Image (cartoon, helix red, strand yellow):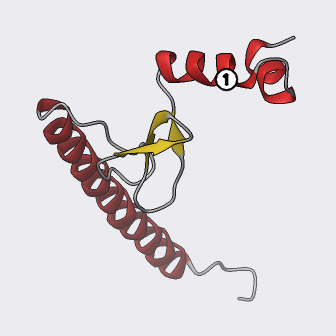
Amino acid sequence: MPDEKDHLGDQLRKKEKAEEERFFSEQSRRQIEKLRETHAKATAAGQATCPRCGAALEVTQMKGVAIDACPKGHGIWLDAGELEAIKKREGDSWLSRLLLGR
């Protein structure tokens, strides 16, 4: 009888895996919905949000240019006008060449 498979054990493992996948799928769905709600509230209020954590971006002045920064340190974002201001200020520096794509 060593050739016989443990059919009941296989079915239990499949059921456990299916329940685990369903659990994590539901967790992911809830997190996505929460981020969407946060983004919708911020958009309705006219406030930009961080794409990583959903926190409201703070406008910060840095060397004469207003930038949008995540308060949790996930990054900074530049609008088109802000990018142009940096290009003008930098002249022919490496940063200007990078931004202009030369």
Residue at screen point 58% across, 81% down = 6
Is 19 rendered above or below residue 48?
below
Image coords of residue 19 (percent x, y): 36, 68
Image coords of residue 58 (percent x, y): 34, 48
Q: Nearer the viewer, residue 73 or 14?
A: 73
Q: Residues within 10 Å of mark 1 (few under 14, many from 20)?
A: some
Q: Nearer the viewer, residue 74 or 79?
A: 79
Residue at screen point 17% across, 44% down = 37
Is 97 rendered above or below residue 76?
above
Left or right: 78 with respect to 31? right
Residue at the farthest bottom position: 1
Image coords of residue 44 (percent x, y): 12, 31
Residue at screen point 75% across, 88% down = 2
The kind of secondary structure element at disc 1 is helix
Q: Nearer the viewer, residue 21 or 48?
A: 48
Left or right: 46 with respect to 72? left
Q: Nearer the viewer, residue 48 or 30?
A: 48
Quadrant for residue 43, please give it: top left
Left or right: 41 with respect to 64? left
User: What count of labels does the image hold?
Assistant: 1
The C terminus appears in which quarter of the rendering?
A: top right
Image coords of residue 70 (percent x, y): 43, 52
Residue at screen point 47% across, 69% down = 17
Residue type at numbered disc 1 = Arg
The N terminus appears in which quarter of the rendering?
A: bottom right
* Residue occupied by mark 1: 89
